[in-house]
Amino acid sequence: MSNAHPTTIPAELGDAFRDAFGREPSGVWSAPGRVNLIGEHTDYNRGLCLPVAIPRRTWVAAARREDRRMRILSRQVPGERTIALDGLLEGNRGGWAAYAVGVLWALDQAGHEVRGLDVVVDGRVPLGSGLSSSAALECAVAVAAVDLFALEGLDGDDGRRRLAEVCVRAENDVAGAPTGGMDQSAALLARADEALLLDFDGDRPPVHVPFDLAAHDLALLVMNTRAEHSLDDGQYGNRRGECLAAVAELGLGSLRELRPPDLERVLPRLSSEVLRRRVRHVVTEVDRVTRTVAALESDGFAALTALFDASHASMRDDFEISCAELDTAVDTARARGALAARMTGGGFGGSAIAIVRTDLLDEVSEAVATAFSDCGLREPELFPVTADGSARQER
Ligand code: GLA
């Protein structure tokens, strides 16, 4: 079981495929994990978010089968699985492999002609870290399937947006995680050195925003707290349900219809303080995404400090999805001079990010590690990332 973090195809992937299946893979594909710069729990509220893909990727070696089954194994998880596409929703969905076989199922449901695949996975996006290991697996399998079955209409920016919808369906309907689509869009549409502005209101194309931190002597530090995070344990779905309840109480189509100045008028109409807090988070968070994009487009990095602070406070106090580990990481990074810091992703554990002057990177990292040890927390995993490219064929 290998857990290092290569940036090129893991050397043993081809051998693992040959050992398992007794033949050559037809190719190797990969898809990245992501961090979200800002805009959390906004995707399923038809809002905005701003992810970047990171150079921690999931690789798959794959070849077509002539039947409608997926045989799959992972170099990180023991055991091989064989899962039939037909009757998938009624039968064994394969545990973690549901994210992979779900993609074939969702492609089939969308009318694409697919058959089975043999797959070996080498996933180097840390699991349960809030860095979208599931979307990386889905999207690596998705681009492999597009190439291996010569599927049409799923290439280019528009095709990739359709492919992201297929992957979301796999995650929602087969894996059972009621997530919103940011992660799959990031894995399929992101570009190196750019952040991806996603607008989930209607059918708006993504906008690529400059994000070359190194040119400004800045770095993006990922702080994986190792506090276990999961998207199918009910807490994420609970927040999504609360947002829907608020939308129903207010008689809206979505929370996107509200702007921060509307809150004073609208919040008193909600039936509980909890719903008021949830709505305030979403509405102010969407506004912060717009401001963050404006700051990045004008090289106004100084503005990120207050925007990230407000975003983290909103998630901690209003959306209530932070935890001691995330707060410790963010507070320590900021106290040690990080320009900006906030938790990222779904919350309830997982990772935080900090934008740090390159010359302070070691100092901030050491301070966070020390703070975790002083608080008796598990040792965090700290690593700088650059904005990477989307899912692709590697060989
Ligand atoms: C997870 C989900 C996304 C999004 C984020 C929170 O990553 O998969 O759809 O909702 O949480 O912003």
Image (tube, rainbow, N blue to C red):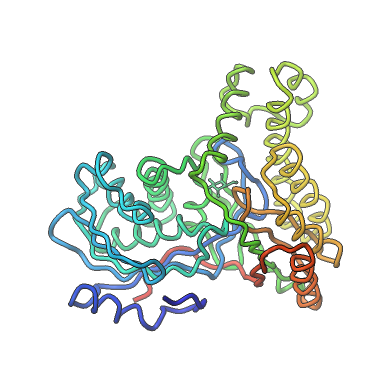
Q: Give x and y (percent) for residue 31.
A: 44, 64
Vertical comparison of 267 with 22: above or below: above
Q: In the displayed structure, does residue 197 sit left or right of residue 62?
A: right
Vertical comparison of 83 with 57: above or below: above
Q: Quadrant of residue 44?
A: top right
Vertical comparison of 214 with 249: above or below: below
Q: In the displayed structure, does residue 352 sit left or right of residue 184?
A: right
Q: In the displayed structure, does residue 164 sit left or right of residue 146?
A: right
Residue found at the very far front of the displayed protein = 376
Total label count?
Answer: 0
Q: Give x and y (percent) for residue 290.
A: 70, 45
Q: Give x and y (percent) for residue 191.
A: 54, 63
Q: In the displayed structure, does residue 152 sit left or right of residue 46?
A: left
Query: Looking at this view, is 208 or 250 the one in front?
Result: 250
Vertical comparison of 112 with 363: above or below: above
Q: Give x and y (percent) for residue 81.
A: 27, 60
The residue drawn where x is 50% and y is 61% is: 127
Quarter of the figure that contains the N terminus: bottom left
The residue drawn where x is 41% and y is 78% is: 9
Quarter of the figure that contains the C terminus: bottom left
The residue drawn where x is 70% and y is 41% is: 285
Residue found at the very far left of the displayed protein = 66
Q: Quadrant of residue 17?
A: bottom left
The residue drawn where x is 19% and y is 55% is: 69
